[in-house]
């Protein structure tokens, strides 16, 4: 083969290689942009998640306080019921003797 054929083949091969590098660069740029968007979305999600987690902890604290109040009231009512049962038993004994 002559020198001109080699130059033509190298020109075509060089053009194809440059075209492939250009296509590869284009897709790499799109992938990088997509990853940047994904990273931003992930950061937003992380901050939102942290905010919701804080709200859940606050709600749990409120529930704990409400349970303390309810348990206190239940214990108080339990004591009153026990006292009333004793009073009823005493009254029943008194009415049997009359």
Image (cartoon, rainbow, N blue to C red):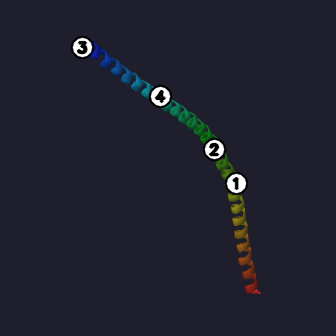
Q: Position of residue 50 (x, y in %)?
A: 61, 40
Give the CA distance from mark 1 to mark 4.
60 Å
**Residue at mark 4:** 26
**Residue at mark 1:** 66
> Which residue is painted at 71% across and 77% down in the image?
89
Residue 78, located in which quarter of the rendered image? Answer: bottom right
**Residue at mark 3:** 2
> Which residue is painted at 33% across and 21% down in the image?
13
Q: Earlier in the sequence, mark 2 or mark 3?
A: 3
Q: Which of marks 3 and 4 is in front?
A: 3
Q: Position of residue 24 (x, y in %)?
A: 42, 28
Give the CA distance from mark 2 to mark 3.
74 Å
**Residue at mark 2:** 52
> Which residue is painted at 57% across and 34% down in the image?
40
Q: Nearer the viewer, mark 2 or mark 3?
A: 3
Q: Which of marks 1 and 4 is in front?
A: 4
């Amino acid at each position: 083969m002559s020198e001109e054929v080699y130059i033509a083949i190298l020109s075509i091969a060089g053009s194809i290689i440059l075209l492939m590098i250009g296509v590869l660069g284009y897709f790499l740029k799109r992938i990088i942009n997509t990853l940047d968007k994904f990273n931003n979305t992930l950061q937003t999600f992380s901050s939102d998640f942290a905010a919701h987690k804080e709200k859940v902890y606050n709600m749990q604290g409120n529930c704990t306080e409400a349970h303390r109040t309810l348990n206190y009231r239940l214990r108080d009512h339990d004591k009153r019921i026990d006292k009333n049962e004793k009073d009823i038993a005493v009254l029943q004994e008194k009415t049997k003797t009359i």
